[in-house]
Image: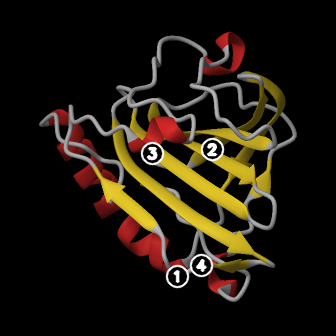
Amino acid sequence: MKINVFDNGYAQAYDKPTVLPAAPEAVPPLTSVSLVRVIHNEADYTLVTADYEASGELRNFHVARANSGKIDPATDEVSYPLNSRDPRPEKYGLPSTLKIDGDLSRNGLRLPSVRESDVATWLIQFHDFGKLIHQQQLREDVPVSSRWLKPSVTEEEHTIGPECDSRFRQQLSMGLPTTGY
């Protein structure tokens, strides 16, 4: 599981999830978390994503610059071995570990500050390996909007989904990462 950034020339990247009217009564286990930050610069935007294991460990970090809906080809993407440290994510206000204990939506997050003042942040929680997604927009580390999403399922996913889930569960049982690939 990981978040990718595409420009508006890649129509296949547009997933059309179903927005649920409310939080489901039974929420499956949290399997990963992503943070997305959109930083408005003078002439363009910096798009930053970070993917974390359910344990809170950073596994993937991606930076892209965009202007007029087009991604600059010079992007920065880094995958991390577990328990590694890198100062670059903090430059964009992304912690090297997330404290995931209890309900992130109620407790909010304490994120490092970003020098730019025009920053939009989203916390995306993936449950049951992405079968249910909780997306929240944060302002000053506190949720200001929230929605629950059910991703669309392709024919291919009906076929390979059970095998992927089995492998994810096997990786988890062995203490191996499932995020950032």
Between disc 1 and disc 3, the foreground one is 1
Residue holding disc 2: 133
Task: Give the distance between the C-alpha atoms of the residues marked 4 and 2, in whole angstroms.
Answer: 28 Å
Which residue position holds label 4? 72
* CA gap, disc 1 and disc 2: 29 Å
Q: Residues within 10 Å of mark 2 (few under 14, many from 20)?
A: many
**Which residue is label 3 attached to?**
51
Q: Residue at x 48, y 46 (%)?
A: 50
Name the kind of residue labelled 2 in the image: Ile
Q: CA distance from mark 4 to mark 3?
A: 21 Å
Element type where label 2 sits in the image: strand
Q: Give the residue drawn at x 45%, y 41%.
A: 89
| Mark toward the start of the polypeptide (4 vs 2) | 4
Q: Amino acid at mark 1?
A: Pro
Closest to the observer: 17 or 176?
176
Marked residue nearer the N-terminal end (1 or 3): 3
Q: Which mark is nearer the camera, 4 or 3?
A: 4
Q: Secondary structure at mark 3?
A: strand
User: Along the horizontal axis of the image, is 134 left or right of 80?
Assistant: right
What secondary structure is marked by label 1? loop
Residue 171 image position (x, y, % from top left): 19, 45
**Reading the chain from its start, which is encountered first: label 1 or label 2?**
1
Q: Quadrant of the C terminus?
A: bottom left
Q: Residues within 10 Å of mark 3 (few under 14, many from 20)?
A: many
Tag 4 and tag 1, C-beta contact below 8 Å: yes
Q: Nearer the viewer, mark 1 or mark 2?
A: 1
